[in-house]
Image: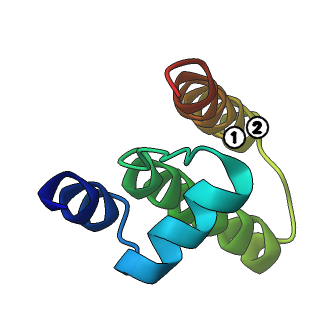
Amino acid sequence: MYYLYSNSSYCNFSMSDYLRSVSVDGYIIKHDLHGLKEVNAIGVNINQIARQVNFQNEVTERDVDELRVQYEKLFEVVNGQILNG
């Protein structure tokens, strides 16, 4: 019983939700989403660039380069999350 309780706690499920999910699906997949903070930071950076472009009503080469850098960071984080489970 302790094993089930620790697994349900680890998955952030109530005991009944955990048992229901395991009995219906046969397994539970838990994703580690620690990269979400980094994704949020990248989104904030991209939003700041967009605001600056809208305010100035022009796009500079520097803006495009910075967007490319932010996109590459985002791609690395998301791919890392997918590949590492």
Inspect the image, locate mark 1, and give the three-letter code of the amino acid beneath it.
Leu
Q: Do callouts 2 and 1 mark residues in contact (Cβ within 8 Å)?
A: yes
Q: Is residue 20 visible?
A: yes
On screen, residue 17 above or below 1: below
Q: Residue at horizontal 86%, vertical 60%?
A: 58
Q: Residue at horizontal 74%, vertical 79%?
A: 55
Q: Quadrant of residue 72?
A: top right
Q: Is residue 49 visible?
A: no
Q: Residue 71 appears at what percent x and percent y?
A: 68, 35
Q: Secondary structure at mark 1?
A: helix
Which residue position is annotated with label 1? 67
Q: Which mark is residue 82?
A: none
Q: Residue at horizontal 55%, vertical 30%?
A: 73
Which residue position is annotated with label 2? 64
Q: Secondary structure at mark 2?
A: helix
Q: Residue 51 appears at what percent x and percent y?
A: 69, 74
Inspect the image, locate mark 2, and give the three-letter code of the amino acid beneath it.
Val
